[in-house]
Image (spheres, rainbow, N blue to C red):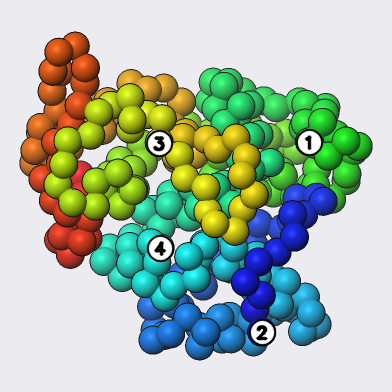
Amino acid sequence: MVENSMPAPSSIQSVAWETGLNAVKDSVSFNSFPEFAKHLQDNMPQNSAEVRQRYANLVIKRLFPDRRIDGLLPQVWRAYGDEVILKDLARVLTLEAEPVIASFVVDFLLAIPPGTAIDAATIRDFVSAAYGSFKEDSYSRLQSAVRHMGLVSRSKGVLITQANSPPSNAYLILLHARLAPTPRIVRLPDILAATHIPDNVALTRAKPYWRLLGMREESEVRTILRDAEAAGLIAKYAVVDQLEQITTRHSYDDYLAGAHRL
């Protein structure tokens, strides 16, 4: 049986990226979460039942934090069937569940320009600082995680920071899901500061989810919102009394039902 919670790991765990994405796609075929969770555990590729359970727990912790068959990722996959949107949102949920990896992404990777080579010593130092001593498995898994999530590429054995396409559609879905489930006015400072900590993750310094989507500058958020206004996906982007704010047009449910996108 898949456990409801996990102890805080003493090292970075495998990101199991493709396994997680496939689990989201499979989940829409099930009517109950326990049924899906059992399927997930039973169909993990590992030979050991104990290891299969551990990997199933990791996937659930990261991508199904509310332990619901109609959670964010299954809903979005059912509505859009879009690999890019799924990967963008899966990256956010994974980083929210893995604050050590999130710190490396936001505080280091997104602080340097795309195309920058990353010195291996920098990654070693980060792992040592995060865990109090160097851990070879965490060093390897951190590199694997950010590469699988599309944040870096590898060239001649060196990691290179990536410039990714704007995550416009994933961002607008999160905006409606988390800040405007019904039409309302939302101030830009609240949008830029918005974070989310899953119930199954210890309270920590959460990162704004626009950063977890891979955006480096606040101007990227403003561009998405202006484009959304121009496309009629939000009602208004305005400056009122020197304060930027948006007015949404759709409820979250209606936004998904219409599979709206830029």
For marks 2 and 3, the one nearer the N-term is 2
Left or right: where 216 falls relative to 199: left
Q: Quadrant of the C terminus?
A: top left
Q: Residue furthest top?
A: 242
Q: Quadrant of the N terminus?
A: bottom right
Q: Amino acid at mark 1?
A: Ala
Question: Could you tell me if the residues under marks 4 and 1 are in contact, i.e. CB atoms within 8 Å?
Answer: no
Q: Secondary structure at mark 2?
A: loop
Q: In the image, which disc is placed on residue 130? A: 1
Q: Secondary structure at mark 1?
A: helix
Q: Secondary structure at mark 4?
A: helix
Q: Secondary structure at mark 3?
A: loop
In this rendering, the answer to whether 181 lies above or below 212 is below
- Is residue 42 or residue 84 the one in the foreground? 42
Q: In the image, which disc is placed on residue 194? A: 3
Q: Residue furthest right?
A: 133
For marks 3 and 1, the one nearer the N-term is 1
Q: In the image, which disc is placed on residue 1? A: 2
Q: Amino acid at mark 4?
A: Leu
Q: CA distance from mark 2 to mark 1?
A: 31 Å
> Alpha-carbon neighbours of circle 2 within 10 Å: few (<14), some, or many (≥20)?
few
For marks 4 and 2, the one nearer the N-term is 2
The location of residue 215, given as percent across then percent down, is: 43, 31
- Is residue 19 or residue 194 the one in the foreground? 194
Q: Which residue is mark 4?
A: 73
Left or right: where 26 falls relative to 10: left
Q: Which residue is pictured at 20% across the width and 61% down the height?
A: 253
Q: Which residue is pictured at 88% across the width and 46% down the height?
A: 136
The location of residue 25, given as percent across then percent down, is: 43, 72
Q: Which residue is pictured at 72% across the width and 44% down the height?
A: 142
Question: Could you tell me if the residues under marks 2 and 1 are in contact, i.e. CB atoms within 8 Å?
Answer: no
> Alpha-carbon neighbours of circle 1 within 10 Å: few (<14), some, or many (≥20)?
some
